[in-house]
Amino acid sequence: MDIDDLAKRILAGERRALARAITLVESGRADHRQDTLRLFEALKGHGKEALRIGLSGTPGVGKSTFIEAFGMMLTRQGLKVAVLAVDPSSTRSGGSILGDKTRMERLSRDPNAFIRPSPSQSHLGGVARRTREAIDLCEAAGFDVVLIETVGVGQSETVVAELSDLFLLLLAPAGGDELQGVKRGIMEMADIILVNKADGDLKTTAIRTCADYAGALRLLRKRPQDPDGFPKAMTVSALEDTGLATAWDTMQELVDWRRDNGHFDARRAAQARYWFEAELRQSLLSRLEREPMKGLVTAAGRDVENGTQTPSQAAEQVLARLEGRLS
Ligand SMILES: Nc1nc2c(ncn2[C@@H]2O[C@H](COP(=O)(O)OP(=O)(O)OP(=O)(O)O)[C@@H](O)[C@H]2O)c(=O)[nH]1
């Protein structure tokens, strides 16, 4: 594969080259991994800094309707928009929340948009790395906004929050006064809560739900990375395209403030460190799961079972062998 040519075409903003490069980073083959590393070397220092927006919401809340309407609004303003997904446990066809071709049909035809389904992988760590690299590729290809979507199963919200500059939580209008069972941890991650479907019969409920969430957000501890009034809850209707422009203004207001106050860069730096540590942990674990370490671990496990070694002794022994191999 001509990696330099691929890099050149990505930097020229060719969507096909971008799609091909993402396929490369998603591949599990060792030679493809080498190609990926060479590709990133060739792309280093080029491209632009996109605004990375994470979006989470349960199935049916209107994520695809929102992303399509929001994405179209941005492309109408001349911005280039990429949509990626993190969905490690999908049972849907193709293992992908964006696999369904009918989702975001208009946006997928927009020349200023790029939509990429989640890789069908069950391992969240693997999905996270691939998504992270896909974001970098979108930035190299000159995208202004990268939307990272998740259905929010298990730890995927944390992954998306650690990949984005801004985290949106999309919610539906809820009857009664209970807060839809949204976990506190997820509320704490949100920068902006968007109560969708604020239209027709649902409008009044949406406004009340929004007020409930605004109240709940006020009870959270103030975060240093937020100006006054954030995190915020707002109503939108993805279907009727209302509230989206205001939501975008609010996102920009928050991002501008964070940039001016050093929080934007600090967050990216902390994220880079987080992913370095995650990658290191994962690589070490996969070394232990591969021969020759795998055999050693099995043998040490047997020693522990039959009492010839204590668990700590056996672990020390395996680690000493690993260090010997690494040094
Ligand atoms: N009334 C109203 N309905 C909406 C709105 N946005 C989405 N819907 C409807 O809600 C349903 C689910 O919308 P989707 O956009 O497919 O939701 P999703 O969160 O992507 O769902 P999954 O694909 O299952 O994850 C569809 O019937 C939409 O038409 C809205 O703003 N107002």
Image (spheres, rainbow, N blue to C red):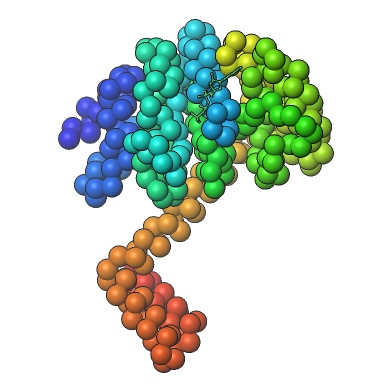
For this rendering, which residue is in front, 107 or 79? 107
Q: Quadrant of the N terminus?
A: top left
Q: Which x, y percent locates residue 242?
A: 64, 11
For this rendering, which residue is in front, 266 or 14? 14
Q: Quadrant of residue 232?
A: top right
Q: Which x, y percent locates residue 266?
A: 61, 39
Q: Is 142 located above or below residue 304 in the figure? A: above
Q: Is 34 located above or below residue 308 in the figure? A: above
Q: Which x, y percent locates residue 47?
A: 40, 25
Q: Which residue is located at x 43 percent, y 33 percent?
A: 97
Q: Which residue is located at x 46 percent, y 38 percent?
A: 86
Please state if 186 lies on the left or on the right of 228 as rendered. Answer: left
**Residue pushed farthest left?**
1
Q: Is 263 located above or below residue 184 in the figure? A: above
Q: Quadrant of residue 180?
A: top right
Q: Quadrant of the C terminus?
A: bottom left
In what quadrant does ligand 1 lie?
A: top right
Please state if 192 lies on the left or on the right of 154 as rendered. Answer: right
Q: Is residue 231 visible?
A: yes
Please state if 34 lies on the left or on the right of 75 as rendered. Answer: left
Q: Is 183 located above or below residue 62 in the figure? A: below
Q: Which x, y percent locates residue 265?
A: 59, 35
Q: Which residue is located at x 27 percent, y 71 percent?
A: 292
Q: Quadrant of residue 103?
A: top left
Q: Exactly how many numbered labels are in the figure?
A: 0
Q: Which residue is located at x 77 percent, y 32 percent?
A: 176
Q: Is residue 38 visible?
A: no
